[in-house]
Image (cartoon, rainbow, N blue to C red):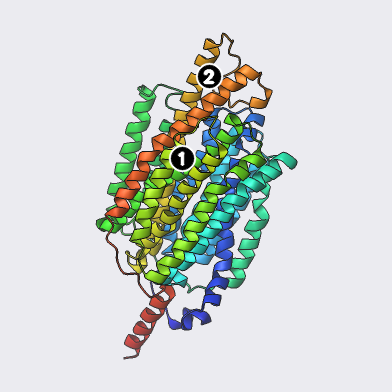
């Protein structure tokens, strides 16, 4: 990339002050809030959405999985584009796509149309997820980044708290469709704010986008996710459909690796995997993604189906988890900046995540809400310590030219883990609930009516039937947390083997300015 001193904005000619960084970050923080809100505000309303649209447990899972899938397969594309083109324009494009998808989702009359709209939302959110971290690396050095990454974690916490609460109040008061509309004003405000406050060096160089790699990755990941989502429900785990989807998915992914090894500008630079820290951070991110997305998505279902809570109450009851995430992310971010060390906090986060998931695995429909709040706070603290710092590890390791690809790599595998987690754990929950409800009704001498795969509205069921359904979903959600607990241990082992590298003291803009100065001096001589 060729950059001249004249291309740098005025604030970049000297070290940016804390106030200047916060002004530049304001639009990014709002964009991150929009990204978080897109999933959390809908999670509380999902049981009612699926009920109104006549959806099944598979539909419930896929409303979430579709967004995560789109986010996952597009994140590395956004990251690669960030290394080639104007990052400000790219993040604004993500906001536009999210806004259009949200408006269309609110008009849904079927779960199929809703899932398609959620895909469009996911593409936009993929851009926001990848680019916010990349642009932060432009503005501040790795040493200072922990402090500002803490702000991103705080916004994540606020969005995660506000989302279920807003979603619950809106669903109870106005209807679930407004859950999709509520994020639109925030997206528009973020777009305007970015235009006014974010000033980055112009970034463009001649390059070819790896369309073949993107297509192969999207096809391979989609094939495997469709398999884990539908196996055991639409067809047997051992069947010709399983063989086609699994073998097809693996073949496509292997082809993607070969393709990316042969092109000049691969979607995911394979050289990144030569670095031990990057590989370990990827492994930990997959585990965190499965544990975080794959379990918290079903907390609202636990609250509303197993405990009979309203959407608003369901949102309020998740506050302990988000409070733990908020405090851990903010406090640890500042400590990383002050001390220059991050590994100790990653290890602590891995311990807390493992313990929290194990404790959540004891859930059933009779668990004390006080105990549940304590368990959620522990798990949230573990996620808060791990999530932002894993991105910092990679950004501090890779070359400046690969910041976009490296940052999006972590987001990609975290989202991939989340999508896999939601699909697999959703399938496990559906199977558990269907089996328990069928056997429970049979033992009670009751006749089953309707489809066992439908998400039930417990408030409309007779007392004995409601108790059977509550028990099935209470123990089922506990089972999927227990299933996810070993993943916390995998994350812990991965971060324990990380080699801590001193945090750099220069931002992306600083490096670009130094290179421009060197280039100009060389040209002048």
Residue 296 position in % (x across, y down): 51, 42
In percent of the image, x 47 and y 58: which residue is there?
329
Q: In this figure, what is the number of numbered marks? A: 2
Give the Cα separation between the discs numbered 1 and 2.
23 Å
Name the residue carrying label 2: 437
Res 204 seen here? no
Q: In which quarter of the image is residue 269?
A: bottom left
What secondary structure is marked by label 1?
Answer: helix
Name the residue carrying label 1: 294
Q: Quadrant of the C terminus?
A: bottom left
Q: Which of marks 1 and 2 is nearer the N terminus?
A: 1
> For this view, does 463 lie left or right of residue 19?
right
Foreground residue, 74 or 322?
A: 322
Packing grade of label 1 (10 A; few <14, some 14-19, many >=20) is many
Residue 353 position in % (x across, y down): 41, 47
In this rendering, the label closer to the viewer, 1 or 2: 2
């Amino acid at each position: 990339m060729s950059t001249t001193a004249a291309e740098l904005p005025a604030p970049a000619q000297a070290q940016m002050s804390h106030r200047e960084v916060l002004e530049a970050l304001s639009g990014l923080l709002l964009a991150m809030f929009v990204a978080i809100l897109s999933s959390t505000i809908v999670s509380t309303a999902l049981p009612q959405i699926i009920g109104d649209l006549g959806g099944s447990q598979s539909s419930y899972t896929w409303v979430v999985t579709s967004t995560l899938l789109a986010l996952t397969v597009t994140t590395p594309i956004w990251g690669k584009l960030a290394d080639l083109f104007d990052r400000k324009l790219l993040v604004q494009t993500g906001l536009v796509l999210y806004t259009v998808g949200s408006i269309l989702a609110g008009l849904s009359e079927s779960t199929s149309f809703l899932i398609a709209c959620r895909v469009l939302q996911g593409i936009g959110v993929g851009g926001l997820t990848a680019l916010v971290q990349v642009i932060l690396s432009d503005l501040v050095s790795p040493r200072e980044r922990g402090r500002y990454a803490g702000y991103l974690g705080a916004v994540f916490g606020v969005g995660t708290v506000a989302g279920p609460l807003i979603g619950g109040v809106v669903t109870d008061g106005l209807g679930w469709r407004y859950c999709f509309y509520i994020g639109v004003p925030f997206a528009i405000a973020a777009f305007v704010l970015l235009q006014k406050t974010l000033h980055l060096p112009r970034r463009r160089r001649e390059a070819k986008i790896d369309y073949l790699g993107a297509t192969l990755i999207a096809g391979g990941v989609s094939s495997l996710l469709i398999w884990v989502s539908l196996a055991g429900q639409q067809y047997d785990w051992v069947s010709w459909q399983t063989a086609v989807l699994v073998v097809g998915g693996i073949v496509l992914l292997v082809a993607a690796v070969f393709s990316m090894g042969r092109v000049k500008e691969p979607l995911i630079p394979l050289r990144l995997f030569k670095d031990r820290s990057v590989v370990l951070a990827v492994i930990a991110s997959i585990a965190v993604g499965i544990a975080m997305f794959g379990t918290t998505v079903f907390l609202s279902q636990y609250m509303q189906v197993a405990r009979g809570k309203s959407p608003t109450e369901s949102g309020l009851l998740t506050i302990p988890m988000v409070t733990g995430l908020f405090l851990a992310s903010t406090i640890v971010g500042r400590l990383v900046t002050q001390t220059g060390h991050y590994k100790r906090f990653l290890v602590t986060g891995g311990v807390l995540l493992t313990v929290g998931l194990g404790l959540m695995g004891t859930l059933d429909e009779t668990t004390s809400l006080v105990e549940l709040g304590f368990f959620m706070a522990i798990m949230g603290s573990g996620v808060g310590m791990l999530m932002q710092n894993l991105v910092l590890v990679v950004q501090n390791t890779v070359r400046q030219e690969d910041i976009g690809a490296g940052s999006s790599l972590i987001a990609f595998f975290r989202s991939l883990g989340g999508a896999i987690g939601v699909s697999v754990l959703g399938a496990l929950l559906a199977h558990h609930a269907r089996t328990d409800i069928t056997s429970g009704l049979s033992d009670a001498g009751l006749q089953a009516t309707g489809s066992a795969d439908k998400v039930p509205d417990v408030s409309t069921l007779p007392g004995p039937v409601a108790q059977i359904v509550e028990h099935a979903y209470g123990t089922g959600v506990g089972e999927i947390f227990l299933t996810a607990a070993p993943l916390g241990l995998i994350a812990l082992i991965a971060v324990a083997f990380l080699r801590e590298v001193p945090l750099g003291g220069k931002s992306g803009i600083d490096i670009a300015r130094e290179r421009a100065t060197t280039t100009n001096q060389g040209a002048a001589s």
